[in-house]
Amino acid sequence: MDPTYKAAAEFAQTWGLIYFTAIFLAVVAYAFWPSRKKQFDEAARIPLRED
């Protein structure tokens, strides 16, 4: 393996982990944000509606 490949692989592993961790935390924050509760409660009742 040449040094360029190794450096690129290390860069991708490190920053990829940081990137996906940040995305995961953003999704969790979105899902548990207090102002979203009403929206999620309404969506949970969609299958029970009789139109």
Image (cartoon, rainbow, N blue to C red):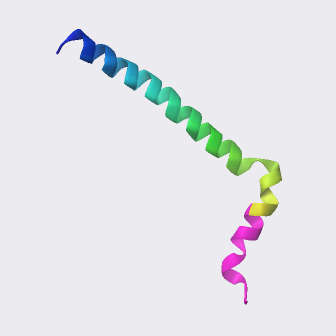
* Residue 26 higher or lower than 18, as above or below: below
The segment highlighted magenta reads 40-51
12 relative position to 35: left or right: left
Residue placed furthest toward the front: 4
* Residue 42 percent across, percent down from the top left: 76, 69
* Residue 43 percent across, percent down from the top left: 71, 69
State the residue at coordinates (66%, 80%).
47
Q: In the rendered view of the protein, which quadrant contains the C terminus?
A: bottom right
Quadrant in the rendering for residue 13: top left
Q: Is residue 3 magenta?
A: no
* Residue 49 higher or lower than 12, as above or below: below
* Residue 17 percent across, percent down from the top left: 46, 29
State the residue at coordinates (35%, 18%).
10
Magenta region, main secondary structure: helix
Quadrant in the rendering for residue 41: bottom right
State the residue at coordinates (24%, 10%).
3
24 relative position to 14: left or right: right
* Residue 1 percent across, percent down from the top left: 17, 15
Q: Is residue 50 magenta?
A: yes
* Residue 12 higher or lower than 37, as above or below: above
